[in-house]
Image: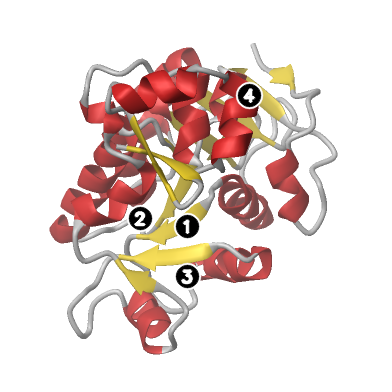
């Protein structure tokens, strides 16, 4: 059963218009974590499949929540790579419908362990414009946007337009000439940064999750690289204990995960 979101979500203020209604199934606490939005074609190459999965998995290991649109192709791979408990699926239909049908089990798992969001009432079926609405919400939730593969004039490029208006950083997988013309165009025009190494890219979110570290409020707070003053004010002596344990480092007045 879906429920209406009553809490204000600050991230969504970046949208052209804050959603008048938002429904959910799952765990709303995922909205408090760092988030990365991943979009791309419904017909990815094997290369795109592999690296979308690897990036999503690596992000999830660092406590980052992966946001995507539950469509076939890149979206589904991103959700699967992150794992149901580390992902948010934004859908273009009512939450009583699992679409596409091929993702019935995936969406059921995300409803149980992760979070599914929709701006549409029960019984609403997808339309061309509802996908556009869905895409804007996907982009708004993420701290950054990754476009895994996209052609010119695709829905993913429309998502890039949303990201640019919202001031989001945009990253893409590098592709050969003649493939993924949309992302190649973004690189040519200087609108996106290429992900040339998975570990280097995900290291911006810290490496502590590879250790036996509890992913609690302190962990997620430190992922945002707050100032030492902000961290001490919120967590007190725990900051210095974590530094001694090698969980965090304090550099230039800021806290980062090791």
Q: Observer-nearest residue: 42 or 196?
A: 196
The kind of secondary structure element at disc 1 is strand
The residues bearing labels 2 and 3 have C-alpha atoms spaced at a distance of 10 Å
Q: Residues within 10 Å of mark 1 (few under 14, many from 20)?
A: many
Residue that badge 3 annotates:
154
The residues bearing labels 3 and 4 have C-alpha atoms spaced at a distance of 44 Å
The kind of secondary structure element at disc 4 is helix
| First-in-chain label (1 vs 2) | 2
Residue that badge 1 annotates:
145
Q: Quadrant of the N terminus?
A: top right
State the image coordinates of residue 150 (x, y, percent, origin top left). Answer: 37, 69
Q: Quadrant of residue 136?
A: bottom right
Residue at figure coordinates x 23%, y 77% from the top left:
179
In the image, which is nearer the foreground, mark 1 or mark 2? 1
Residue 67 seen by the camera: no
Residue that badge 4 annotates:
234
């Amino acid at each position: 059963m879906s429920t209406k979101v009553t809490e204000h979500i600050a991230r969504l203020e970046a949208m052209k218009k804050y959603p008048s209604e938002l429904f959910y199934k799952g765990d709303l606490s995922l909205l408090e974590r760092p988030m990365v939005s991943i979009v791309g074609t419904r017909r990815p190459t094997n290369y795109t499949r592999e690296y979308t999965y690897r990036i999503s998995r690596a992000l999830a290991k660092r406590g980052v929540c992966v946001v995507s649109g539950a469509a076939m192709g890149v979206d589904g791979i991103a959700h699967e790579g992150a794992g149901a408990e580390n992902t948010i699926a934004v859908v273009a239909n009512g939450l009583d419908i699992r679409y596409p049908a091929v993702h019935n089990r995936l969406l059921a798992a995300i409803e149980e362990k992760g979070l599914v969001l929709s701006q549409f009432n029960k019984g609403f079926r997808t339309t061309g414009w509802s996908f556009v609405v869905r895409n804007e919400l996907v982009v708004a939730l993420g701290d950054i946007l990754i476009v895994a593969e996209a052609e010119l004039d695709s829905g993913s490029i429309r998502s890039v337009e949303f990201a640019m208006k919202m001031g989001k950083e945009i990253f893409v997988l590098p592709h050969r000439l003649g493939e993924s013309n949309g992302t190649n165009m973004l690189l040519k025009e200087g609108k996106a940064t290429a992900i040339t190494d998975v570990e280097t890219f995900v290291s911006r979110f810290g490496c502590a999750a590879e250790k036996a570290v509890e992913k609690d409020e302190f962990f997620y707070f430190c992922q945002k690289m707050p100032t030492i003053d902000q961290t001490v004010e919120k967590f007190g002596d725990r900051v210095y204990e974590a530094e001694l344990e090698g969980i965090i480092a304090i550099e230039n007045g800021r806290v980062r995960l090791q």
